[in-house]
Amino acid sequence: MKKTKASKPHTAALAGNPNVGKSTVFNALTGMRQHTGNWPGKTVGSAEGTFSSLAADYILYDIPGTYSLLAGSADEIAARDLLESGVAEAVVVVCDATCLERNLNLALQITELTPNVILCVNLLDEARSRGIALDLELLSHRLGIPVVGVTAKKKRTLVPLVRALDALVEGGEQPSPVRIEYDPETESLISTLARDHGLDRGRAVRAIASGEYGDAHMRDGIANALVRTAEELCRGVVSVTGAADARDRALDKILTGRFTAFPVMMLFLALILWITVSGANVISEYLSRALFALESPLKYALDALRAPAWLSSMLTSGVYRVIAWVTSVMLPPMAIFFPLFTLLEDVGYLPRIAYNLDRPFHKCGACGKQALTMCMGFGCNAVGVVGCRIIDSPRERMLAILTNSFVPCNGRFPTLTALFSMMIASTLASSLSLAAAVTGGVIASLLATRILSSTILRGETSSFTLELPPYRRPKLCEILVRSVFDRTLFVLRRAVTAAAPAGLLLWIASNVAVGDGTLLTAMSRALDPAASAIGLDGVILLSFILGFPANEIVVPIMIMAYTSSGALTDYTSLSELHGLLAANGWTGVTAVCAAVFTMFHWPCSTTLSTVWAETKSVKWTALAAVIPTAAGVLICAVIAAVFR
């Protein structure tokens, strides 16, 4: 018989380590689409959704994935605060069936905060394929809480989980979680804190683990007790008979090996960039023709509306042409690069890249998590800056923010690709040059981090937990959706928004007469002396300045200034571009300095506004612009002086 639902919805929270499929459970229950990743720290805020069972309505919170409630990163604090607030009547702790023992560490901590816990063991299908068998009834008996096994991507397997949740919130049999036994000294201090400060057991344990009370010996004892209890609970519950772990270890010997890790990383990078460059050139040509073909109909429509000639020219040759250019140049490489990058994330290789780069970052005085934010910066530096929230230490977080722009984002790829393709006829060679430039950006980021950590941001380097998840078969449809909607369209929308006012400004600069030329000509002449000192000319330097809203329009601005066309002008081939630049005094040194300055100059407007939003500091925002620019100016000046 169907039960009558309560008038007020119940509340529940989903907790768990990163990569356990927690957001997949959330999506399946609520119908909302949430981005899921294969490395830690993706989510810092809590998502909220609703769903209904036969017995009740629910508000469900998807709190950030975390390994522990005893540390202090932004995601761990957000998870802990929601659990301690009491807003959730029940907590569903999602675990990975392939690494249950490690996941139980968090589950045990949560049971000390609230007894209303359900353990959801996800990825049962993956466990079976890896030869892992689980006795969930025995585990439930030992834990003293309900344990439900699911395969979250198959929604029907979540029915037992919903029934267990109904039973818990509707006043059924209350769980009696296993009690973690600490050493006598720690137990005594827990009792004292409960008596003198009114702390419950979970908060008392966290106060000791954070160093607020007790000593280092007690803190180590708490960590050891959690590990020991998880081991005892899993003894006889988990049995492994498959060879999947041996396969993963064999792959890890290659992908994370001492002598093979970095060559393999370079090989993957070169391959991705070669595919991106080769494919983007073809797609960009067709897209450019289609978008620029719409300019004439737009002009005819404005003329039909009897718009003034100057307004028609401003909107078509200025605003629309810049938008069309940015879209045709930026969209194709993003549409190729982001799915390939997401593919590496989905199969589990991205965390291994972070693992490989952890040691270099530690040697530079930074946290290894900076490797993750740097990888995010390849797609968009603004996204990389936001990702720095996963770093616990304010000092190390600032290091990551200030140096993220040293790695070239997707917006700089078109300029670098054009320069390398112009200098090097072979597509493969230009792709390798682009890979070398990206590697140079990583090295520069490490050097800048080292300098900053030894000067204005001195301090001790912290440690962190980095999970190496099992290798998984990629979900191609999901990869396409995530890369297109979560990344490509997000960045493209940002670029188009910046391109519209940039187009207006460029039209004014190239059409307003000043003396014997235009405002654009006058500004480039004024910048000639400063630009010459770093191997450039006034037009190149002005193009970078006017390209502040979006890096994709730097080369088009150069062409417009050199041809005095009054609007952005496309080039039919790289040989035509080469001839134009050579006719305006470009040499091999100029091309090299332009490529270097493309790599190292001020971040785009979106990135700097993101830095301001994250730091609320004029000082740090200014430094985020000055530091990479100073590096670019210094390198270009040295190159120009040597060859001069």
Image: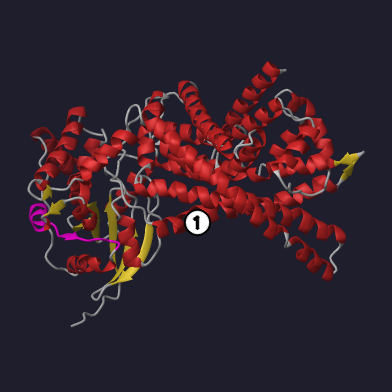
- Which of the pair 417/110 is nearer the observer? 417
Going by the picture, which residue comes out furthest to the right? 516
Quadrant of the snapshot with the C terminus:
top right
Seen in the image, is 221 located left or right of residue 553?
A: left
Question: How is this picture coloured?
Answer: secondary structure
Task: Report whether residue 394 is seen.
Answer: no
Going by the picture, which residue comes out furthest to the front? 426
Q: Return the x and y of residue 85 as percentages of the image width and height.
A: 30, 54
Q: Residue at x 33, y 54 (%)?
A: 63
- Which of the pair 215/508 is nearer the observer? 508
Seen in the image, is 207 located left or right of residue 366?
A: left
Residue 149 is inside the magenta segment: yes
Q: Amino acid at mark 1?
A: Val
- Residue 286: image quadrant is bottom right
Q: Residue at x 73, y 51 (%)?
A: 503
Q: Is residue 165 above or below residue 185?
A: below
Task: Report whether residue 600 is seen.
Answer: yes
Q: Return the x and y of residue 530 as percentages of the image width and height.
A: 75, 26
Q: Return the x and y of residue 557 as percentages of the image width and height.
A: 74, 43
Mark 1, residue position: 484
Q: Residue at x 26, y 42 (%)?
A: 248
Q: Give the magenta part as a residue range.
A: 137-153
- Which of the pair 12/121 is nearer the observer? 121
Seen in the image, is 136 located left or right of residue 339?
A: left
Quadrant of the snapshot with the N terminus:
bottom left
Seen in the image, is 515 located left or right of residue 87?
A: right
